[in-house]
Amino acid sequence: MIKIIRNFAKRILSGIFGKRGEVKLGFYGSPNAGKTSLANKICQDWLGEDLGSVSKVPHETREIQVKEKVMIEKDGRRVEFKLIDTPGIATKIDFEDFLKFGMKKKEAQGRAKEATQGIIDSIKWLDDMDAVIVLIDATANPYSQVNITIIGNLVARKIPVLIVANKIDLKKADMKKVRAAFPEYDVVGISAKTGENIEEFYESLFKLVKKAK
């Protein structure tokens, strides 16, 4: 009887996720948009641990970071994710920008080189994603070249997208402007720092998974 139940469960999961098992979920966006902060929030909520370190210095995440078997459950539903946090995408990286944060010239040049390689790796990993969360700073102009480029690449690859506008806890946050910029996409506003609206975000994740079948 136990074997029958297990086989039935496998068939159900197979119907939901196909043969790939856990959903490969990528986090993309500009530097300091909050990708790692959100990934950490998810990992803290469901695993009790962080995925990576966060800093005010741009390009703190310069290598692909992966956390497997992140199981999210809500209202009797569950989905298992492989979270993939990618380095921030930028159209230009200048080592002099890092000097503003107290780095020496050699260290700043090294950071810029690593950041550039991180962007290259991020783009390469796009083809391996089942679904992608595009993090946008709700206090910044959503019509940026980076945002448009990322979403354009996802559309070309037919990868399901959820746009998450982070930092809604800040006064300058403008959700109306973000939604107006991307009317054809699902958009949810959150604060990865305070956890504001995180339940709506998790609900949006389940909707995203359905599109990733």
Image: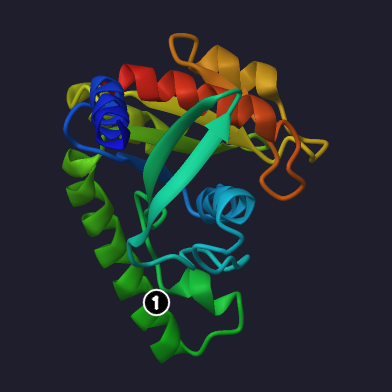
Residue 115 lies in quadrant: bottom left
Q: Which residue is mark 1?
A: 111
* 182 vs 73, nearest the viewer: 73
Above or below, comparing residue 77 to residue 26 in the picture? above
Q: Eyeballing the image, is 20 above or below 120?
A: above
- The answer to whether residue 142 of the structure is visible from this angle is no
Say whether residue 196 is left or right of residue 78: right
Q: Secondary structure at mark 1?
A: helix
Q: Residue at x 51, y 49 (%)?
A: 35
Image quarter (top left, top right, bottom left or bottom right) of the N terminus:
top left
Q: Quadrant of the C terminus?
A: top left
Q: Residue at x 34, y 67 (%)?
A: 63
Q: Amino acid at mark 1?
A: Arg
10 Å crowding of disc 1: few (<14), some (14-19), many (20+): many
Q: Quadrant of residue 21?
A: top left
Residue 189: percent from the left, percent from the top? 65, 28
